[in-house]
Amino acid sequence: MSVINSKIKPFKTQAFKQGKFIEVSEQDVLGSWAVFFFYPADFTFVCPTELGDVADHYEELRRMDVEVYSVSTDTHFVHKAWHDASDTIGKIQYTMLGDPSGTVTNNFGVMREGQGLADRATFIVDPEGVIQAIEITAEGIGRNAKDLVRKIKAAQYVAAHPGEVCPAKWEEGEKTLAPSLDLVGKI
């Protein structure tokens, strides 16, 4: 069952952000765009390359009114230890959600059965808390933050321009489409 166009489910969990422990709930997410960036575990291999890539794009995402929430089933204490131990993770300014209970991971449907680990999954959530895009990859396939930024720009454009859609590889400023009977078979 697809979760596209569904509202995120309630949660409350501890997180690590910019040297502090904070509590985050689904209510904190509402009102701006959000990315939930799930990954299997701290102190691993592909995960830090992805989290570092997102960190490199975080300022741009904030200018777009997007908040980032990375999520693993590790605790907020482990996130702090990893942040302190790794130069790559040390540059992260966004919120790192601890999810040892698996509530957030299960809410989004990306818990690996019998493993207690999250899949490598990305969710783009609009300001009303509605999921607009999902990307899930296999264990060894890292994601690309540049393409994540492109997808968010497309989602924001479509939200602001009802009746228009963004074609494949759409970049900000390029032509969009207005679906109609006249376009059928013409593309």
Image (cartoon, grey):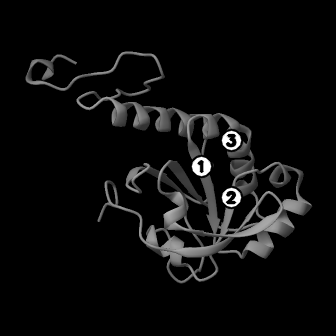
Q: Secondary structure at mark 2?
A: strand
Which residue is pictured at 52% across the width and 58% down the height? Answer: 29
Give the mark, 3 or 2, whose residue is nearer the N terminus: 3
Image check: 82 left or right of 98?
right
For residue 111, say whether it is visible: no
The residue indicated by pointer 1 is 67
Q: Residue 123 in the image: state x and y as whole percent.
A: 48, 54
Q: Residue 95 in the image: state x and y as whole percent.
A: 68, 58
Image check: 149 left or right of 169?
right
Relative height, residue 84 to residue 117 (above, below): above
Which residue is pictured at 79% across the width and 73% down the height? Answer: 78
The residue indicated by pointer 2 is 95
Relative height, residue 142 to residue 183 (above, below): below
Image check: 125 left or right of 74?
left
Q: Secondary structure at mark 3?
A: helix
Q: Which mark is residue 59?
A: none
How far is disc 1 from disc 3 in space, using C-alphas?
8 Å
Give the mark, 1 or 3, whose residue is nearer the N terminus: 3
Q: Secondary structure at mark 1?
A: strand
Number of numbered discs: 3
- Quarter of image, res 77: bottom right
Which residue is pictured at 43% across the width and 24% down the height? Answer: 170
